[in-house]
Amino acid sequence: MASTADIKNGVVLKIDGQLWTVIEFQHVKPGKGGAFVRTKLKNVVSGKTVDRTYNAGTKIETANVDRREFQYLYRDGDDFIFMDTSDYDQLTLTAAVVGDAANFLLEQQMATVALHEGEPLYVELPASVVLVITYTEPGLQGDRSTGGTKPATVETGYEIQVPLFLETGTKVKVDTRTGDYLGRVND
């Protein structure tokens, strides 16, 4: 058991038998009345977010979540195969556990897998990854000054919006949280 003073971003709480990770928190000390903590929590399994308020000093139950580095090996149907680089054990994750990270996973890429009591919860990727555009329509000559975008398919099969001047074969940096184009990468 912990108290509200231990609430920080990334801490996983156990509430009503479910695991919730703290996205945002704010300690508030009003002029009148007792202090309290406002939190924004995200359900680890469903992804649902809720706002919760706790009085200062309230006891809360934290969950022990082990975050370990795994190497993504390959996809087998709807399953994703990861390998623990320390002991070479393989871990099979379902598409539901991998979630949106599947749009940015390349073979041999490192990813953080969160485990609770040996059960995989979710996959965390770096904030951005470099991917190669495998297909996009050619940009039109007159469209370059408008700052418009066009769809482009990257090597994972995911479709992103890129500026009109980019061509097939270009390496781009993509935000793994939003899927937004961040810039071109030059080797």
Image: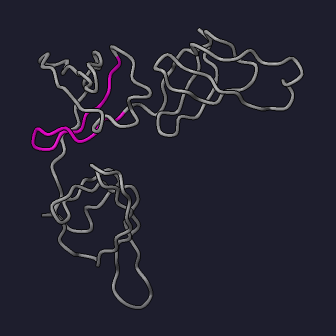
Q: Quadrant of residue 185?
A: top right
Q: Quadrant of the C terminus?
A: top right
Does 14 appear in magenta? Answer: no
Q: Quadrant of residue 6?
A: bottom left
Its colouring scheme is one colour
Q: Residue furthest bottom?
A: 32
Magenta-drawn segment = 109-124
| Residue at 23% in and 75% down | 57
In the rendered image of this protein, does residue 24 appear above or below residue 153?
A: below
Q: Decide if residue 178 is on the left or right side of residue 72.
A: right
Q: Decide if residue 72 is on the left or right side of residue 84.
A: right
Q: Decide if residue 116 is on the left or right side of residue 177.
A: left
| Residue at 41% in and 31% down | 126
What is the total number of numbered labels drawn onto the structure image? 0
**Nearest the camera: 114 or 38?**
114
* Residue 152 on image: x %, y %: 62, 22
Q: Decide if residue 46 is on the left or right side of residue 142.
A: left
Does 120 appear in magenta? Answer: yes
Q: Quadrant of residue 55?
A: bottom left
**Nearest the camera: 83 or 158?**
158
Q: Which secondary structure class fits the magenta region best?
A: strand
In the rendered image of this protein, does residue 158 appear above or below residue 122?
A: above
**Nearest the camera: 131 or 7?**
131
* Residue 176 on image: x %, y %: 47, 33
* Residue 169 on image: x %, y %: 61, 9
In the rendered image of this protein, does residue 109 appear above or below residue 12?
A: above
* Residue 32 on image: x %, y %: 42, 91
Q: Quadrant of the N terminus?
A: bottom left
| Residue at 70% in and 17% down | 137
In the rendered image of this protein, does residue 177 appear above or below residue 4?
A: above
